[in-house]
């Protein structure tokens, strides 16, 4: 299960991102921005890497590990781009069977949501839980 944060902004210049060799999908700039604040909050965070659906980072902290992804269709971007950030919490089979360590009230997701909502250049923030 993933939690999604959707938003629009002109904050990121996708033309300066490294090309995604798998698919021409942007996402590196958003993850680099989030990575900076996550590191300040004492999370361990990898460098962004590509996937066929966009870009991702691995995040560890708060006694959990996560995959955080970002993507936007921005081949010829207008000034404002629509973004999706997804947060997947890694859970063991035992956790899943026993219903433990769910994303509800998750500290990493709460932090990412706060980072996004606190930026005045970000608009139309929407949260989707349990996708």
Image (spheres, rainbow, N blue to C red):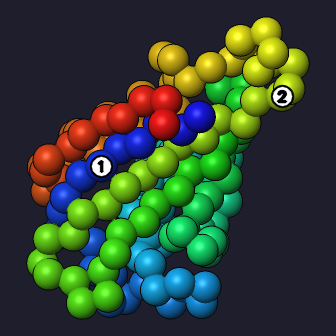
Which residue is pictured at 35% across the width and 44% down the height? 5
Say which quadrant the N terminus sits in. Answer: top right
The relative height of residue 3 versus residue 11 in the rendered view (above or below) is above
The relative height of residue 24 versus residue 61 in the rendered view (above or below) is below
Work out how far the residue at label 1 is from the one at label 2, CA to CA, in angstroms. 27 Å
Residue 28, x across and y down, in percent: 47, 72
Counting other residues with Cα less than 10 Å from the Cα at mark 1, is it few (<14), some (14-19), or many (20 or more)?
some
Give residue 66's mark: none
Return the disc, 1 or 2, that comes first in the chain's sequence.
1
Which residue is pictured at 83% across the width and 28% down the height? 92
SS at mark 2 in the image: loop
Q: Check disc 2 and report the residue beneath it.
A: 92
Q: Check disc 1 and report the residue beneath it.
A: 6
| Whether residue 43 is visible | no
Counting other residues with Cα less than 10 Å from the Cα at mark 2, is it few (<14), some (14-19), or many (20 or more)?
few
Question: Quarter-wise, where is residue 79 in the image?
Answer: bottom left
């Amino acid at each position: 299960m993933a939690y999604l944060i959707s938003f629009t902004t002109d904050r990121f210049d996708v033309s300066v991102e490294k090309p995604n060799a798998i698919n021409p999908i942007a996402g590196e700039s958003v993850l680099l921005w989030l990575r900076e604040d996550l590191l300040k909050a004492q999370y361990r965070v990898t460098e962004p890497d590509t996937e066929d659906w966009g870009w991702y980072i691995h995040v560890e902290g708060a006694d959990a590990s996560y995959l955080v992804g970002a993507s936007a269709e921005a081949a010829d971007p207008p000034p404002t781009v629509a973004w999706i950030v997804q947060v997947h919490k890694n859970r063991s089979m035992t956790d899943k069977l026993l219903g433990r360590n769910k994303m509800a009230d998750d500290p990493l997701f709460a932090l990412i949501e706060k980072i996004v909502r606190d930026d005045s250049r970000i608009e139309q923030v929407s949260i989707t839980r349990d996708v």
